[in-house]
Structure formats: structure tokens, C-alpha cells
Amino acid sequence: MAAEDLPSEFDVVILGTGLAESVVAAACARVGQRVLHLDRRSYYAANWASFTFNGLLTWIQQHQESQVEEEIKDWSNLLEKGEGLIYLSNPESTSIRNLQVFCFTSDEDEEEAQSPDSPNTTEEKAVYESEERSETKSAGLNEEETKEKPEEASDKEEKEQAAQREALEPAADKPHPSAAQSQSEPTQKNISYAHLVKEGRRFNIDLVSKLMYSHGSLVDLLIKSNVSRYAEFKNVTRILTYRHNNVEQVPCSRADVFASRQLSVVEKRKLMRFLTSCVEETEDQQAYNGRPYLEFLHDQQLGDNLQHFLLHSIAMVTEDTPTEQGLAATRHFLRCLGRYGNTPFLFPVYGLGEIPQCFCRMCAVFGGIYCLRHSVHCLLVDKNTNRCKAVIDSRGQRISCSHFVVEDGYVGEDRKVDTPPRFLSRAVLITDRSILPSDSDQQTFYFNIYLTDSLPISPQVSVVTVPPIAEGCPVVKMVELCSSTMTCIPGTYLVHLTCQSVGSAYDDLSPVVTRCFHTPDSPDQDRRPSVRWCLYFNMADGSGVEVEGHNLPSNVYVCSGPDADLGHEHAIKQAKSIFHKILPEEDFCPPAPNPEDIIYDGENTSATGDEDKDGEKTKDEAGEDKEKLEEQSIQTEE
Amino acid sequence: MAKTYDYLLKLLLIGDSGVGKTCLLFRFSEDAFNTTFISTIGIDFKIRTIELDGKKIKLQIWDTAGQERFRTITTAYYRGAMGIMLVYDITNEKSFDNIRNWIRNIEEHASSDVERMVLGNKCDINDKRQVSKERGEKLAIDYGIKFLETSAKSSINVEEAFYTLARDIMSRLNRKMNDSAPSGGGGPVKITESRSKKSFFRCALL
């Protein structure tokens, strides 16, 4: 089937299926542009993708193997007079590094004994391979650290060996399955590695960790464009923060504030007054412009508790963020409250990787052509106009286009504006229980009719803000997903940690992991969730990448990968600006007609008046429709 | 808005390009046939409400939007599907061979309890037939799923196919609802419940 040839002429060719690229694709196809959307990878969504557990293992393996340099073919025979060539590079080689995998599952599961190839060997191999890689790689990432590295690495190795000994012991010492029970928590069934693999397809593990602000630009765009029909969402049910070695719930809505047990009456009154007052901009606030938000908060006489909540969990800014930014972030938070639930955030069911795919679907519905495992090798540039006239795809076909949109990673370093490469540190954990188990009354309150088999577990989706745990450490954002988000199996939680890189992902995040979770490294006192499996990696930070200004033709636009922010503003803003550069006159993602409203008339077009011959509504009607839909969606609050 | 149906079922059409998925969809939803659909531009899904055992069942049937052409169907397409029609063209051997690949695809991405059915379309063009009815039947038996030969053009078995799939989904749902009755959770499709308090935390951004 893939042998089918592509048409040789398009209006817009897009390479890379990340969020910004996919939004541009949908927007262009929606207004009638002929779009070809390609990705070199075998999956959608690039660095925004979600994987099943097994899919993630394959992804890890791919990034651990030394990348085979692709032979650069000479395409100059396809050149016409006055044309030049620009070769593209391979995006995967640069954007992901420092992969480390740790597995702390125990072996008591019978299935494991039966499985022909022992999962333990694969685990060990994965750990050591990744360890080697991290040493070589981090040398490139951070020069100063190289001196300490050997020591640290051997230290790590010891720890791992310890971890593995621990993992191996139950099986070695006590082959009887039931004996291992005594080691684990009495009520929790330990999850084996074989179980994770067997149930692997029920995981949807995101490479990025973000949430959708319910009044953010992504949600607004999903509603406006009707792309929202392709996905379902869950509310983030609570906001937590890590403080004094404890996880606490942050009261953020009016109801939360009144129900809060950790705030005094005076504090409640102060907090309500503060939140009400900061909605409007006042002179008092302006006086603090340019000075840290912390200083402003301090001068409001709020006390330590509230100051912590307001700075870290509501504004989600750092101590030196200027007041005007802090207040803007606080207002944004407040504006998003209560639209769909009691926190400002939504999370897509099946993971964030769904979102770019939903936009791709919209593009396809409006005629966009999709090919994965298919790339563009080089661009053909008209030397006179400095515009990209055509591309040569990975099969050597010349495809002409008026515009070319490309994921940042495909553009060679030599052509990019010189910005110092920044990275995000990421960790993904599979744990056995929530970081803050909810009260039993809450469990019934969050009762969910859709997932009857996962009822005993409280379906909480939490965002946890972790302020720097020591001087110089980064602020860490943690998102804990329960199985009702369809990203992990019942009995497990999926935890994502993200921060701006200071060192490698392991250096940045493992101190937080050892504090908040139980790993073989941590003292075995406690009721903290146990980590079953975890992955650390660094990903290139897309926030610094510019759309234009690179050493590229004027009709080539660069989309950046994921950034560190919790929301999606960066990618949506970028997509919108690219779209307006390509099509300055056109509307960005007008609502797609509701299929139920399209009445097919066959040969007789006289039957209905409300559609034109394409089955599309007039603008006014579509606008009305949108409002109606928005009202409906707000109704879900009640 | 008053509900005009009791159940909403999401169905998918899957199969190679050119086997007549969109034609089947139009035959069933609009009782129309038009050979000029070259591709499936602008069609997301079609709706038809049918009645089974006195219940109004709204079938929402999704088309591939042409993404099957280069085997690049988004995983998101499979989410929440309750039934899948696997379609091949009886005049095209290759499309029949690929059914196995599509089944593998479904097993990977769709929910594990999705109802499936195989359709051999274009059975009106018997003189160009490449795949015998027996081979279609055998394939279906191998996978334990139902099979029909259809013609969207001559309107053969199209109604039967969709009614059969819908009935199979409903009987599975009823079984499931009886099983989980003590928890009072209800099936995942009862739309009348989705506006109730309980579903507060699952919102669709319509």
C-alpha cells in the first residue's frame, strides 16, 4: 500500500507531527490548502507522543543505539537551473539524551517464572547500557561536571546493583510466591515487570508533561475548531505542593479555601481577600513592577503558608519572578478556575499524545495527506528569490510546494540562529499508590461511572509543585495520573516530573524522587508510594526556537519542540503565527461543520437550504453553532 | 435538548483505500450511492439512528479520512470505538490479504473488547471477483468474527451488516451491565447519564 505514489504538487509541505506542526496542518487544510504532512518516525506527535509501555521500551532502545548516520545522497541531478540544495538532518539524534532506566519490580509473580526469557536480564542490560550512554552524553551537556562524573557514576552503579539485588532477592531466597508478600505493603499487590509488559498496551506514557489550562489557548482552539470532538478530557482534581517533607493540598477555589483544614480562619480570610483583590490591577500592585513577586506577597502580610501556596502553586513562578508576571500568572489561574472543575486544568484521556493526532485527523478530513516513516531529504531553493520551490522526499521524489514547515530538529545546527541549547529534565515513574491518598468520602465523590473496574482506587489527577529542595536546585512540576485517565493500569499511578535542566535529568530529579517516593535508595520507613519503574531523560527545550530568522529560505518556517511551561501557549502561538505568515488573509481554524448538520443531497441539491454545495455552513451559522457548543460544554460544570 | 436516542455507539470503518468504505457509509446513512467520491474529504462521521428491541440506537460511524492510504491512521481514531467494520474488495486480492494486517492494527490500538465484523464489498461485480466467498468466510471463522458480502452500489446486505454489528455490541453491553450491576456504574454508553452529577469529572470539550 505504501507503494502508492504521492502527488507531486502541494501548497504546504509539513515535516514533523508535533503539536505546532499539526495545528498548522489542520489550519491550512481547513481553509482549502493542499497539505502534505510527513514524519520520519513511525509514530505521530514527535516529542509530544504517548507510548504504550512496550512502545516506550522500543523508543528507549532506539535512542540508546548509536544512531547510524544516514548516507547523504547526492540529489543534485534533480536540480534545475538556478536552484540550490539545503540538506535536512535527523531530528532524533539531538533532541533526546541522558536516558536512564531503573526497574524496582519484584519477581513474585508466577507469570514471570514461566516466561521464557527472564525480564531481569533485559532490565539489567537496559540499565547498564543507559548508564554508559549517560556518562558519555552528559560530558557533552555540561563540561564542569565531567570531573565528578566517574565517581558519581560508580556510586550510581552501586545503588543500582543494590536495587537489583533487592529486586532479585525475593525470587532467589524465597521462590514461593506468597513469601514475597511479607516484604511488600500488606494491602498492595506488587506489580511485576512481566505484568507491566503484559498490560503494556494499557499505558499511554507521555514524553512531555503538560496540562491544559481550561481558558488557555489550546482549549480555546479545540473548541473554536471543533477538533475537541476527537478527544475526551478529565479534570485535574487537586493541586498539591511539597513542603516541610510533606505533600499538602493547596486550596485554590472558594470551596477549597472554606473546606481547608490546614488554614486558620484568619488565613482563609486573608487568602480570599488577596485573591479577590488581585483580579483587578491596582496602583498598589504597579508600584511593585520590576520587583520580585515574592516581595509583593511578603508585603501583603499573608504569612508563610499562604505565601508558599500563592507563589509556588497558584502563580507557579519562582522567587525572583517580577511582580507583574506573578500577578498575570495568578489572574490566569483564577480565570481558569471553575470552567470545568475545581482546578484550572484539564488532561486528555489517553494522554497528551492524542492532541497533535486530533489536529492531524482534522487536517486529513479536509484532504491533507499523511505519511509516516517518510521524510524530506533536502529542499530545492530558487537562488534568485531565496524561496523553497520544492522538496525531495526520502524516495527521491521531487514535490513542489509554496511553503515548507519543519520541526526544529530537522534543521541542521549550521543553519540555526545561535541560541545556547537548553534542555528539560524529565522523569517518568510508575508507582503503586497516590502520593496523597484521598479520604474515603472523596473516593465516593469522585466516583466515575465510566470505569467500573477501577472503582476501588480513588481517581485523582494531581499536579504537585515542588519548590527548589536546596539552593540552586530547579523548581520541579509533578503530575500524577490515575488509571481513569487511561494512561496507566488500575493499581498503578503514572507520575511525570519536569524541570528546566541544571544538570542531567537524573541529577536534577532523582533527589525529588527519593524524597517523595519510596525507592530502594530511601530509608524504608514509610507510607510513601513505591516506585516500580522509572525513566530519566533530557529533552531539548523548544522555548528558545524562533519561527524565522534562521539561515533558511523565506518561505520555510521552523516549529519548536515542547517547552517547560505547564500550558501549551507557546506551541499554539507559534502555530498561529506561522499560519498567518502563510495565509495572512485567512481565518485560523474556523469551526469544522458538525457532521450531523451536513445533509447529503445526492444529485438533488434543492432539498435543504442551509448548506452550500460543499456541505459547509455559512460563517454566521457556524459562529452561532460554536456558541451553542460552548454553552453545552460549560454545562458540564453543574 | 430532548434526547432522541437511548444509546450512542461509535463504529469505525477500516480497510484499504478504494474498497468502498465511504460508499458503504453513504449507502447506510443516506441510502445513496455515488461513484464520484474520489476521496473522503470533509467527512468525519455519519449518523443514523436505528431501532433495536424498542431502543433507539444512534450509530456514529467514523470514516478514516483517507489516512489508511499510507497506513497512517492515528491511534486516536480507535479510541472509544465499540464496533469495527473491516472492509475488503472482493475484486481486489490485496485488500483481502491486508485484512489480517488491519486486524493486527486493531488489536494493538483499539479496546480489547471491541466487536468486529468482516465485509467483502462490491459483490455486485461478480465477473471481476478475485476472492471467493468461502475464503472470506474462512478468514472470519479463523478470527471468530461475523462475515457478510455486501454491495454498496446495489444495496446488498448493507443494512444487515450494520444492524448485526449494532446488535452484537448491544448484547455485549447488556451482559456487561448485568455483570457490573452491583456497583451501579452502568455501561459506558448511556448518554442519558452523562449529564448527571456522576459524570462531572469526565467532560467532553464540545
Image (cartoon, rainbow, N blue to C red):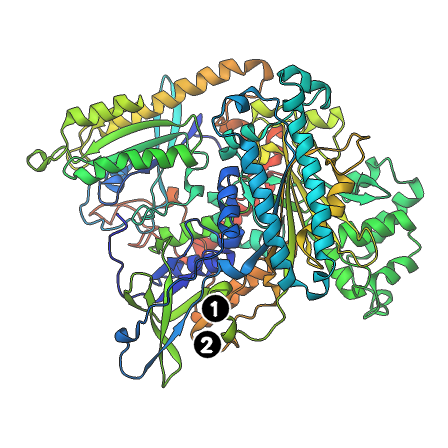
Task: Judge by depth and name the residue closer to the eye, B67 or A206.
Answer: A206
Image mark 1: chain: A
Q: Which residue is mark 1?
A: A411
Q: Please tell me the numbered disc located at residue B70.
A: none
Q: Position of residue A163 (x, y in %)?
A: 69, 36
Quarter where residue A481 is shown: top right
Q: Is residue A616 visible?
A: yes
Point 58% across, 22% down: residue: A109
Point 68% across, 16% down: residue: A179
Image mark 2: chain: A
Q: Is residue A638 visible?
A: no
> In this picture, is A66 found above or below A170?
below
Task: Judge by depth and name the residue closer to the eye, A471 or A104.
Answer: A104
Query: Is residue B159 toward the left or the right of residue A624 in the image?
Result: left
Q: Which residue is mark 2?
A: A552
Q: Position of residue B113 (x, y in %)?
A: 43, 25
